[in-house]
Amino acid sequence: MDINAKPAFTLKDVTARSLVLQVSDPEADYGTREYEIWLNGEKRLATTKTVESVYGLTPDTPYELEVRRDGVSSGVTPVRTKREFVTLDVRRFGAKGDGETDDTLALEAAILCCPADSRVLVSGGVFRFRTLFLKSGLTLEIAQDAVLKAIPDKTRLPVLPGRVESTDGASEYLPGTWEGEPVDAFASVLTGMDVHNVTICGRGVLDGSADFDNWWDAEKRKNDPARPRMLFLNHCSDVTVEGITVRNSPAWNLHPYFSQNIKFLDLKIVSPKGSHNTDGVDPESCENVEIAGVYFSVGDDCIAVKSGKIYMGKTYKTPSRDILIHHCLMEDGHGGVTVGSENAGGVWNIRVQNCRFKNTDRGLRVKTRRGRGKDSVLRDIVFDHVLMEGVVSPFVINSFYFCGPDGKSEYVSSKKPLPVDDRTPRVGNIVIRDVTCRDCHTAGIYFYGLPESKIGEVLMENVHISFAENARPGRPAMMQGCDPVCRQGVFIRNARRVVMRSLTITGSEGTAMDLENVDEIVGQPDFAD
């Protein structure tokens, strides 16, 4: 890379009051070399974030935007902010923002009254509320000095029914869901039901108020409806969430469900280690999702791409597809980017590029099992230009995932080939290219396909794995019969074709290559002490 080259950028989004840009740096991940953002010849900010937001703009106004690095300018790009009719300040609707008052009705009133091309503004305080429902055409801005803080009192939350039969008995309406099934669920902190053209933005905080004494305590939730998520988007489209910090979610943080054209840009998503099911972003049966410039530190998978359990996959046959994940930092959590395990509708065309994983349990994590069904086809999954540091097990494909009521049954756990039928899932092609993994612990590569439905093809090219000096043993995959290992190089069971080009593994111990029932191997790893 030429450090004196003219900087360049791409606009990711423009609202009436803000913009989001991405610096064009092919070698960068979540961070890059410091640069400056200038508007109309004035410096607005200096940053090292590859994806960055600028706030405080004026509606329907032309700007001259440029990026400068080391005194070199990108050149001026004209940008015009969007029109805004009115701003509705929630305090004018009675919200107190004193951190004690229940402001739910005032906040919801402002949202319901918001006309087209307008903004609801939350600023200058801590606003307590139970749940809020979004509407189409809404821009909701949480300003830098504001916190939207949920009241974690389940006795005061509405419940979304899992299934409502249509009057003609021919179809159904599914408002509530949990882990891929239509079940009764508490309304989420922010809930969007069939809404479109929505923006949630700002430099403020959305706080779910969850902790180990309320939503994360399993004993206190017995016989309850499913937990709320922080943001639930049910059959929505053209929704953008940008700039805000999301913390302490009761369960999954951002959950788009049967939705299209969704963007998550320049966010911070945080929950403590051990907080149950606090996945970062879980697109479920969604199409055209972009996750860019997001910082994750959560108690479960950072990103988990899903498409329903057996009933949802078989009935609606809606895969998650065309999902782009780039310039993100995944720190802590069970998996950096996970596919599954609820994937009965299939997962197609997932691209992960220019990301960094730090201290996650796994990097790429594919988890499926028998019973997900013939529509559960996982294919065209690409990891490109990724850096992993301290990741316990960088690459895991697990076709025997054992969590859930039937996860430890003989049908799921048997390593013998079983008949291929309507219950049999399939893992197709996966590409892992230009990836470096440092200070790993258990297994560098752990792939375990079904003997009757082998992993299709895995291409690994220019991949470098090294183990930590103080590597600790552990189980690479959550499956029956997976014993603890340490510094295991390559373990593959039941695959059709594995291609290894410029694959190096440093510091492995014991049996470096452990292969069984692999039809074709192209190339070999280069092992080093």
Image (cartoon, rainbow, N blue to C red):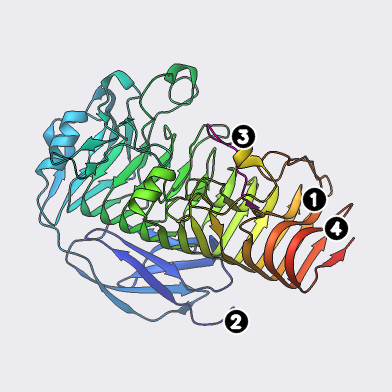
Helix, strand or loop under label 1:
loop
Whole-angstrom CA distance, mark 1 to mark 4, is 16 Å
Residue 44, image x, y percentages: 37, 63
Q: Is residue 365 magenta?
A: no
Which residue is under mark 1? Answer: 468
Image: 217 above or below 414: above
Helix, strand or loop under label 2:
loop
Q: Which mark is residue 2?
A: 2
Tell me if mark 2 has few (under 14), some (14-19) or many (20+) residues whose alpha carbon lies within 10 angstroms of its own: few
Q: How many marks?
A: 4
Q: Main secondary structure of the magenta part?
A: loop
169, 459: nearer the viewer:
169
**Going by the image, does 244 lie left or right of 499?**
left
Instruction: Identify the amino acid type marked 1.
Output: Ala
Tell me if mark 1 has few (under 14), some (14-19) or many (20+) residues whose alpha carbon lies within 10 angstroms of its own: some
Q: Residue at x 50, y 23 (%)?
A: 212
Residue 347, image x, y percentages: 46, 58
Q: Which residues are magenta?
A: 397-409
In terms of image quadrants, where is residue 21?
bottom left
Q: Residue at x 61, y 79 (%)?
A: 1
